[in-house]
Amino acid sequence: MADREFDVVLFGATGFVGKLTAQYLTESAPAGARIALAGRSPQKLAAVRAELGPAAAEWPLVQADSNDQASLNSLAARTRVVVTTVGPYLRYGFPLVQACAENGTHYADLTGEPLFIRDCIDRFGEQAAETGAKIVNSCGYDSIPSDLSVYQLYKRTVADNTGELTDTTLVAWLKGGASGGTIDSGRAMMEAIAADPKKGAVMSHPYSLSPDKAMDPDVGRQTDQALQKASNIDPSLNGWVATFIMGAHNTKIVRRSNGLLGWPYGKNFRYREVMSAGSSPVAPLVAAGMAGGIVATMAAGAVLSRVSAGRKILDRIVPKPGTGPSESTRRAGWFTMRTFAHTTSGAKYVCTFAGQGDPGYQATSVMLGQSGLALAFDTLPEIAGILTPASAMGDALTDRLRKAGITIEVEPA
């Protein structure tokens, strides 16, 4: 792809996260990087470019529309990498994946939608593998911290010769809010399941994104629901943990990485994610409320998504896509993910993945931007197809994020 016009095209540059990612690229892209901004409106793209300052003054603008396959084919043929923030991906994402798969163009997105990824695997996986396209899903807070944490734990067990991974649990602490785009993605999945109830199995099965069903480990029940004392996970932890709303998606990505890499984490690898509810006297009630609230909210959303009147109600009460918090609020956010792992030899490790900034906005723009730069400029594994961050960019992306100020450390527990 050396003769292509651009190194990276950012599609969706006029959206909220798109603007943040564009700003990050002005600060972090290497000198001479050929970057372009893409979207439906040339006028809006020009306005965004003007706000980015001198570093982006010469960036070309590319008009492309998710509803215009020819424009996406042209975009994909002109660049080495497409980074896209245009979601919900179930509604708008398939034509761009098709264009990248056909043209052998690398791709990174922010999807937290298992239904979208499963359809991409089935519809475009073989072609992407044939053309050499790396189609990398979930390159933001969902699911890079989860995926790279387990990958680095695996690398440490190999270095120490301490056996394969077994019971592994990620505990999340964070300060940040849910974006309108994330909520709209949830709605898109609920509507898809309402139209075809069989798709519900993709959401509920832990290995629904597996690359080879015949190789799925038989490790018994792995639930994403949680309400328990944190010390049950590791004696160093206090308080209570509850269900982590993105755990159901992140765990599927981690298990897919295991499969794509040839099951190196081990055939007895069990993985789940939970969220800290704190250690105050009311923490058990908080944990119970978090767990029950997530289930109740999802159930209510599923019911409302089934009928036109219900969808109109959701339109009025949920945050709109493309909206987000102020800069001061974004900068005040933070996240810490600690993943506790056991091995077949009895060794225990913990991986800490932590950073400053609202995880869904500030930190996500860093992760997505660095993913695009890694795909464009780094020497990566030869694997192609519908991939995960760890399988496509493992060590290269880890190194980039560390240099970008994100903590990624593995230590004996």
Image (cartoon, helix red, strand yellow):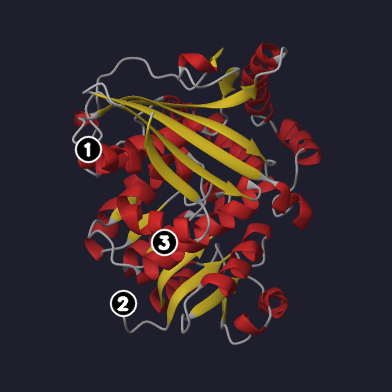
Residue 363 is left or right of residue 370, and the answer is: right
Q: Is residue 240 above or below residue 380?
A: above
Q: Is residue 222 left or right of residue 87?
A: left
Give yes or no for contact between labels 1 and 3 (Cβ–Cβ under 8 Å).
no
Report x, y in % for residue 79.
41, 75
Indicate the quadrant where residue 234 lies: top left
User: How far separated are the C-alphas under marks 1 and 2?
Assistant: 38 Å
User: Which residue position is annotated with label 2?
Assistant: 1
Q: Is residue 375 above or below residue 208?
A: below
Nearer to us of marks 1 and 3 is: 1
Q: Residue at x 37, y 56 (%)?
A: 135
Q: Quadrant of residue 252?
A: top left
Quadrant (top left/top right/bottom left/bottom right) for the N terminus? bottom left
In the rendered structure, are the residues bearing label 1 and label 2 in contact, judged by CB atoms less than 8 Å apart? no
Please tell me whether mark 1 or mark 2 is closer to you in this view. Answer: 1
Q: Position of residue 370 (x, y in %)?
A: 47, 62
Eyeballing the image, is 351 above or below 372? Answer: above
Q: Which mark is residue 107?
A: 3
Q: Residue furthest bottom?
A: 58
Q: Amino acid at mark 3?
A: Tyr
Q: Amino acid at mark 1?
A: Asp
Q: Residues within 10 Å of mark 1 (few under 14, many from 20)?
A: few
Residue 356 pos. (x, y %) = 62, 50
Residue sitting at x 51%, y 63%: 369
Residue drawn 50% across the image and 55% down it: 93
Give the CA separation, mark 1 to mark 3.
34 Å
Residue with the mark numbered 1: 160
Where disc 1 sits, the SS reads helix
Residue 41: % across, % down:
67, 73
- Label 2: state its secondary structure: loop
Circle 3: is it few (<14), some (14-19), or many (20+) Cα within 10 Å? Answer: many
